[in-house]
Image (tube, rainbow, N blue to C red):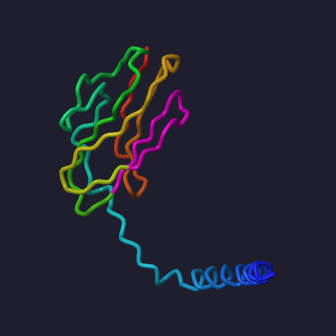
Amino acid sequence: MRMDIMKKIFILILPILFLCITTAYSEVPEEEINLPALASASNISIDRAVIAVYVEEREPIDEGVSFDSSVGKLYCFTHLMGAESETFIRHVWYYKDKEMADVLLTIKSSSYRTYSSKNILSFWTGDWMVEIIGEDDTLLKTVNFTIE
């Protein structure tokens, strides 16, 4: 009997709590939300961007523009210069103009090396590219390569 009463109370209170939480959250005016300013991509330059078979000690190993279909995995290594504050870039991987991955990478200093990786299936032969895109959606560089 007591359990039935508790269930009924819970069922009545739950929607009220949900409504209160939702209302409290939605009442924050948009202009009061303090978001950090976007770092301008015009300040960032790409010192080096390559496709490699490995990355060791923050350096690309076996760089190339053409790779065997048995490679298994590739890395897009990027060395950026000029970031004035913490920001991010994206590596967007494309195979035959189809987006295969979109990787967000945080940039933490004015000279920063970073990379993303993509598993490559043996039948994904043909043209690939990685677009390196700044925080403000500016295209910083495109790196093209082929799987044979």
Q: Quadrant of residue 87?
A: bottom left
Image vertical order of residue 76 relative to residue 36, above or below: above
Q: Residue at x 51, y 35 (%)?
A: 100
On whether residue 93 falls in the magenta region, the answer is: yes
On whether residue 60 falls in the magenta region, the answer is: no
Which corner quadrant holds the C terminus? top left
In this picture, residue 31 sits left or right of residue 43:
right
Residue 90 at x, y = what percent?
Answer: 40, 47
Image vertical order of residue 24 relative to residue 48, above or below: below
Q: Residue at x 20, y 56 (%)?
A: 109
Image vertical order of residue 119 relative to residue 114, above or below: above
Residue 38 at x, y = what percent?
Answer: 36, 65
Magenta segment: 88-104
In this picture, residue 114 sits left or right of residue 92:
left
In front of the other: 40 or 2 = 2
Farthest residue, direction front: 1
Q: Residue at x 48, y 33 (%)?
A: 94
Q: Report how many numbered discs are placed on residues in the image.
A: 0
Image vertical order of residue 49 relative to residue 23, above or below: above
Q: Residue at x 35, y 41 (%)?
A: 141
Which corner quadrant holds the N terminus? bottom right
